[in-house]
Structure formats: C-alpha cells, structure tokens
Amino acid sequence: MIKVVFAGTPAFSVACLDALMQSDDVDVVGVVSQPDRKSGRGMKLTPSPVKKAALAANIDVITPEKLRENKEALLWLQEKDCDVLVVVAFGMILPVSWLEMPRVSPINIHASLLPRWRGAAPIERALLAGDKETGVCIMQMEEGLDTGGVYLEKRLPITEESTGTLLWEALQSLGAQALVESLPKIVSGELQPVPQIEEALTYAKKITNDERIVDWSLDADYIERLVRCFTPKPGVRTAHQGKMLKIIAGVVLEGNRKLQAGIVVDVKQGLDVSCGNEKVYRITHIQPEGKKAMNAADYLRGAQIKAGEVLS
C-alpha cells in the first residue's frame, strides 16, 4: 500500500484526490490545502474544494498560511511517514524541507505538455495561442517552477469547439487517470523521469482581468478563442456607450474590410464588429449588463446599436 500525502486546493485537484482515495494501491494519510478564503455574496470563510473532499472522507487536513519555516507543518508531514507527496494545483511553492521529506521525490500533475506552458495558466494559454493539442504531465518536483523531469504524459486535442470549461473538465479526468496509472510505477522505480527540453519551453503567465476586456485591434481569430476560453465564466466583455456587454459566443467572418477596429459593421444577423486583421467577428450570443444571456439578434431588436458605432 502506497502512503500518500496530497497537496491541492481548487476543484481541478479534487478528481485526482478522489482517484487516489478509490485506488486499492493507495492510502491517503493526509491532505494539505490552502486556508479558507472569503467568497460568495456574504464573503464568508469557505474551505477549498480539496479540503471539503478530504473532510468528507475523514482524512486529516492542514491549511497552513505558509510552509517555509513552518515547523509545525513540517512535523505534521514527518509524522505522516508518507511514501510520496502528490501535488495538484496546490498554489504554494514547496520548500526544500518538504521536497526532501518523503521516501520518493514528490510528484506534480501539470495541465500542459511540458515544457510548453510552464506556470500559472497552462490551459488558458494553450487555447488562446491556438495550440492544436494539450494534455497532462506527471512530473518530478524540483525547486524550479515546473522544471522537473516528466514520468508520463497524456495528450488531448484542442478543437474549434473546445472551450476553457470543457478543457478543464477533460484534463481533470485525464490527470486522474494518468496519476493512478503512473504512481505505482514511479514508487517502484519502473518509471524514471525524462528531462525536459529547455529550448522548447514557454511560460503560461497568470490571466489578468484586462485580458478579458476585448481589444478589437487584435486578430479576430484570437478574439474568437478568447471568448471560448472564458465562456461562460468569468466571461469576456466589451462596452457600448458606457455599458458593459458580456460576449457569450461568436464566429469569425472572412473578408478584407479596412475599417477602424471596433466599428460595428452590421447588425442584421448578429453584432458584426471589425477587428485588427481586417476580418469581422460576429457576436451571436450576448449578455447585456444586468440581464440574462440571449441571442444577439433578440438583443439587437431592442438595443439602439447601429452600423458605424464603436465598441470599446
């Protein structure tokens, strides 16, 4: 039986924790997650999804504010006497003392095909960049950011219908499968980490709020991917006469229209907007400020938006 301490925080991590708890080869002896955070309308302290799952399974959980120079947390890990530490979207950098404690080097599940998209937002960056595939890597943890060798990778195509939400869900499942498949082989030494090719690396920097406000001077194909990436939540926004509009869905129209970016070209079949690459992005579904999402044609029947106006 493999004794595991699991470190994770968001919903993405829960599928992997569940897979470990259901495995006949694994005993999850403890869970580390980030502290409860304020959330919701009432801004009440709320445990992370991983903490909730662990408590429901009667697993011992700690939620330290930090791990570096935290003797109490390190003693807790030592007392667990685990074979391996499994880390999935934990959200904290592990100090050397934690990396060296288990009998087997800690492993991490990373949602990209390393070394492409090391860092905070690999799923979103792969979709925004127009990558044709993504995947998950089971990797050896080091002090560096996602620099360890890769034990196993599983690939997933990115199609024209892929959204950020669909990719997250698919990679959750794929990561859990890869973890359960590889963990016994890693612990036994059957699987050895393969060093990453440093020349191929790219970084997936954190998504900012400004990136989810449409810059119409950008390529229409990028804007189409941007909408798919953040639909339905948190959404991509533009503005008309000072009021925010959330773009739910749209398509790119081919053409060669040398117009100022952001100009409304047509409102007959959707909200057609000129983009930086001289193509047009047609908004087909939209959510006006303070209202429900709707078909753009329905919105345009009541909205006073005319061809020639500018979205910002």
Image (spheres, rainbow, N blue to C red):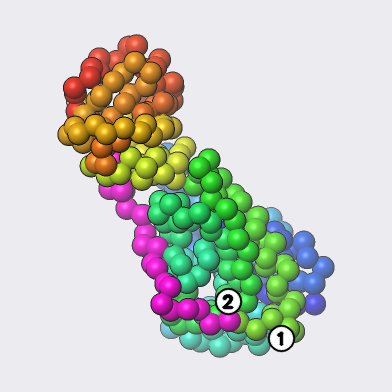
In reply to whether residue 206 is colored magenta, the answer given is: yes
Disc 1 crowd rating (10 Å Cα; few below 14, some 14-19, many 20+) is few
Q: What is the x, y in percent for residue 52?
A: 61, 55
At 71% across and 86% down in the image, what residue appears?
A: 189
Q: What is the x, y in percent for residue 298?
A: 40, 15
Q: Is residue 136 left or right of residue 35?
A: right
Q: Is residue 84 left or right of residue 62?
A: right
Marking on residue 150? 2
User: Disc 1 on helix, strand or loop?
Assistant: loop
Give the camera-side residue of 197 and 15.
Answer: 197
How many labels sit on residues? 2
Q: Start and end of the magenta stretch?
A: 194-214
The reply to whether residue 122 is in sight is yes
At 77% across and 61% down in the image, what residue appears?
A: 22
The reply to whether residue 93 is in sight is no
- Are circles 1 and 2 on residues that touch, CB within 8 Å? no
Q: Earlier in the sequence, mark 1 or mark 2?
A: 2
Q: What is the x, y in percent for residue 190?
A: 73, 83
Kindly indicate the quadrant of the structure image that contains residue 15.
bottom right
**Amino acid residing under circle 1:** Gly
Disc 2 crowd rating (10 Å Cα; few below 14, some 14-19, many 20+) is many
At 28% across and 29% down in the image, what residue appears?
A: 273
Front of the two marks 1 and 2: 2
Q: Which residue is mark 1?
A: 189
In reply to whether residue 175 is colored magenta, the answer given is: no
Q: Which quarter of the figure is the N terminus placed in?
A: bottom right
**Where 52 falls versus 64 (above or below)?**
above
Cα separation between marks 1 and 2: 14 Å
**Amino acid residing under circle 2:** Val
**Where 18 falls versus 169 (above or below)?**
below
Give the camera-side residue of 156 and 91.
Answer: 156
Kindly indicate the quadrant of the structure image that contains residue 172.
bottom right
